[in-house]
Amino acid sequence: MEWLKELLEKAKITDGKLNVDEVMEAAKKEFPKHAVPKNVFNDKCEELKTANATITTLKKENGDNEELQNKIKDYEAEIGNLKTAAINATKQYALKEQLTKSGVLDPDYLIYKAGGIDKFTFDKDNNPIGVDESIKAYREDKTMAHLFKQKAGYEPSKGGSPTKNPFAKETFNLTEQGKMLKENPAQAKELAAAAGVTI
């Protein structure tokens, strides 16, 4: 209120009267420099109320937004898990197909024995690579021979129907083994080796 005091001190008094119109005119010019008009004040108060209401609303919505963000994260994690499961299923089917082509009779068991599909190598299209090298140890293991297809049976040189491998566990026959060793020793050694027997 110093500015008003200065205005009143500078005011001219003539014949003992204060020139009110002159003081009012000076006050109107100085007032906006030192104070805010009521309508501007009211407008600013209204803007402040609106801003506070907006902040309250945003805080409330942000709480929901946080919940929504958490749901989105959960869904993204679920989608990632589903993608991984789909890729693993694709790999497993491709691997089973390749193992079957390589002569494996029970691909599921062989995959299990190997330690799962992670123990096999796949290319960028999820196709198995190096399967024969991966299963070589199992193919050579006598205890795992039942997991692989056996070679064709012995075909007698004098014609007739092919016989089963007499050295194989499923078709073991000492009489046939002796007969085969006598008639065709090379074929007998080959069938014995296929069955995991050394002669």
Image (cartoon, rainbow, N blue to C red):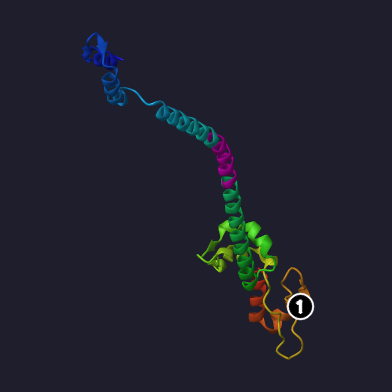
Question: Percent from the top left, x then y, of residue 145?
Answer: 67, 66
In this figure, which residue is indicated by the disc labeled 1?
176
> 103 above or below 180?
above
Q: Quadrant of residue 5?
A: top left
Query: In the rendered view, does 96 fall on the left or right side of 29?
Result: right
Q: Residue furthest top?
A: 16
Quadrant of the rendering where the N terminus is positioned:
top left
Q: Which residue lies at the image location 61% right of the left edge and 72% below the top edge?
A: 102
Q: Is residue 71 visible?
A: yes
Residue situated in front as seen by the camera: 90 or 185: 90
Residue situated in front as seen by the camera: 181 or 121: 121
- The amino acid type of the residue labelled 1 equals Glu
Q: Which residue lies at the image location 62% right of the left edge and 68% below the top edge?
A: 99
- Label 1's element? helix
Q: Quadrant of residue 71?
A: top right
Question: Percent from the top left, x then y, of residue 76?
Answer: 57, 50
